[in-house]
Amino acid sequence: MGKHLSFYKLISCVCVIYILYAGINNYIIDPGAETFLRHKTDLSRELNTPSWLMVMYFHVAFACVAMASGLLNFWARSYEKHRRLHRLNGYVYVSSVLLVVLTSGYMAPYATGGKISSMGFNLLNLIWLAITTTAMVQIWKKRVAQHRRWMIRSYAFCFTNMLIHLLTFVLHEVLGIAYVTSYMIGLYGAIVLLLAAPEVILRMERERKPFV
Ligand code: HEM
């Protein structure tokens, strides 16, 4: 129980800090995304900056809602004692995922790093949709344990942006690799980690106690 609670608390802290960071950075400190956009020097199609920014604002907002609502639904009491709230909040999560995927679909063709990055983001979109749909189908079939496992896999994708920037930072700032190359490696590295991390958590759970 102690381990379960402390892991949940740790993830909660990371989420709260990240949501605050994403909100402050993207809506207050750098609302024109100038730091990020200055790396887009080699795009094959012209970027309509005002439209891109508008879509990005929605993208960040729904991504933060997905992160917060998902976190709330992993709180054990939510499904043990507040089933209706869990179900309602679950639909908030799934709707937010759909809207993040939709906005991501608009931004993917303009991704930093060109075609290779675009393909990576489209792949992410497809995998996230497939995993989230599977989680929903499992609960419609009343398979609670499988639903929970697929939701853990789905929720991992809320950490996409954080992981890409973390990996890009290490590769670019620490190892001195060019920013665009670092970003592309960061993106594919993030895909691997987002798929692997839930499997590690689930395996540890099978061997010991539930973590989330
Ligand atoms: C909590 C989760 C997420 C947050 C907070 C978030 C936030 C952001 C932000 C702030 C940007 C603007 C550029 C930057 O500063 O990185 C961005 C770009 C983007 N995001 Fe997300 N995002 C999240 C999840 C996702 C997911 C799951 C996908 C794909 C399935 C995705 C796809 C994209 C794409 C395609 C871009 C444009 C990248 C580029 O222009 O190079 N994001 N996101």
Image (cartoon, rainbow, N blue to C red):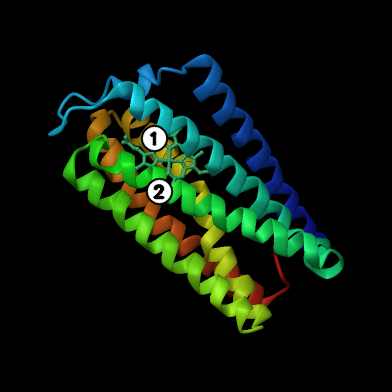
Residue at 50% in and 73% down = 134
Q: Are marks 2 and 1 in contact (CB under 8 Å)?
A: no
Residue farthest to the left, as pictured = 44
* Residue wearing tag 2: 102
Instruction: Determine which of the numbered discs, if any, sits on residue 170 in the image.
Output: 1
Residue name at image x 58 percent, y 79 percent? 138
Residue 136 vs 178, above or below: the answer is below
Q: In the picture, which quadrant includes the C terminus?
A: bottom right
Say which of 198 and 55 sits in front: 55
Question: Compared to 195, does 98 lie above or below?
Answer: above
Where's residue 168, x and y in %?
36, 36
Q: Quadrant of ligand 1?
A: top left
Mark whose residue sits in front, 2 or 1 = 2
Badge 1 amino acid: Val
* Of residues 155 and 56, the one drawn nearer to the viewer in this rendering: 56
Residue at 53% x, 21% y is 27
Q: Is residue 205 above or below residue 174?
A: below
SS state under label 1: helix
Mark 2 close to ligand 1, CB under 8 Å:
no
Residue 177 appears in the figure: no
Which residue: 44% across, 37% down?
Answer: 166
Q: Residues within 10 Å of mark 2 (few under 14, many from 20)?
A: some
Amino acid marked by disc 2? Leu
Decide if residue 39 is on the left or right side of residue 209: left
